[in-house]
Image: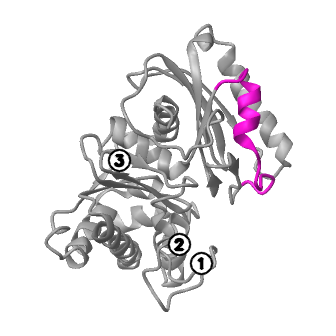
Amino acid sequence: MHTDSAAEPRLAGGPATGLVAALDIGGTKIAGALVDDTGRIRVRVQRPTPAREDGETVMRTVEDVLAGLAASPLWPGAGAVGIGSAGPVDAFRGTVSPVNVPGWRGFPLVERVHRATGGRPVTLVGDGVAMTAAEHWLGAARGHDNALCLVVSTGVGGGLVLDGRVHPGPTGNAGHLGHISVDLDGEPCACGGRGCVERLASGPHIARRALENGWRPGPDGDTSAAAVAAAARAGDPVALDSFDRAARALAAGIAATATLVEVDIAVIGGGVAGAGEILFGPLRRHLATYATLSFVRGLTAVPARTGTDAGLLGAAAAARTPRA
């Protein structure tokens, strides 16, 4: 949502000049930055998210991050604010309802940030769309007119680039591949669906599947997806199978999306992507079996390049885009 326009947000066109303020809001941290027109982060502030507190306490943390940015002598040059938030978001109404921040349900974040920043225009996107904007501006999707970008972590989010423009959709959730069903008889998902990509490919579910099938953690007791990836690198067959199943679910969702809208590249970031070839090897193999039509056969899957700054850079890209 843009605070000075009722039109649907569109992340299109080249970036404007000057600095923008960016916020990356998740269940673990609330980060802020002042970002210049080359994508360089000039000032950075970060606080832990009080995710289990009430909504006003969470908002006070956002205001504290903004105050940290405002303390910089560069702050007067920041003409707009971009927010990338865990979702669901409603970019048209400017509200957020992050699953992992229960104190925020329909919270009017855009209006509150607009007031807290002295009336600066504010643009809101979901975290998957923010990552997509970052990768299209500065990362692996740069130069691609049609791309799918994914965040594979605690959940599975995503966003689309179509005809050279990031396409957030009316509410900012377009490209949310995590809740495409790829197993019609699969397990129920938290979203209410069944057999969703997220249920098969997110970090917690990779670890859950490995544990259910006999994998056991090392002496440190680490049961994360990263620990499963380490076991897979060491040749553990159960760990390898768990990543193979996740890669197959991702491949099915990516191929379905490519068939629908003709993307030619899938860019994958997030913690699970840190597994490297343990994930990307079987992913490419399974893509070859799902993306079989002539117009999607050249589809490639590559790691994201913007790393942990993707949320901030994508929020900055959203703010820098001329308003519709």
Q: Is residue 39 visible?
A: yes
The span from disc 1 to disc 3 (Cα, nearest Å) is 26 Å
Disc 3 is placed on an element classified as loop
Q: Is residue 305 a member of the stretch shown in magenta? A: no
Circle nearer the viewer, 3 or 2: 3
Name the residue rendered at 58%, 64% in the picture.
221
Circles 3, 2 touching at the beta carbon (< 8 Å): no
Q: Is residue 234 visible?
A: no
* Residue linked to disc 1: 189
* Residue linked to disc 3: 304
Q: How many marks on residues? A: 3
The 10 Å Cα crowd at callout 2, few under 14, some 14 to 19, many 20 or more, is: some
Left or right, residue 99 beside residue 134: right
Name the residue rendered at 24%, 41% in the picture.
143
The amino acid sitting under disc 3 is: Ala
The amino acid sitting under disc 1 is: Cys
Residue 205: assigned label: 2
**What residue range appears in magenta?**
101-120
The picture places residue 88, in percent across and down from the top left corner, at 63, 58
Name the residue rendered at 58%, 25% in the picture.
80
Q: Quadrant of residue 44?
A: top right
Predominant secondary structure, magenta span: loop
Name the residue rendered at 46%, 31% in the picture.
322
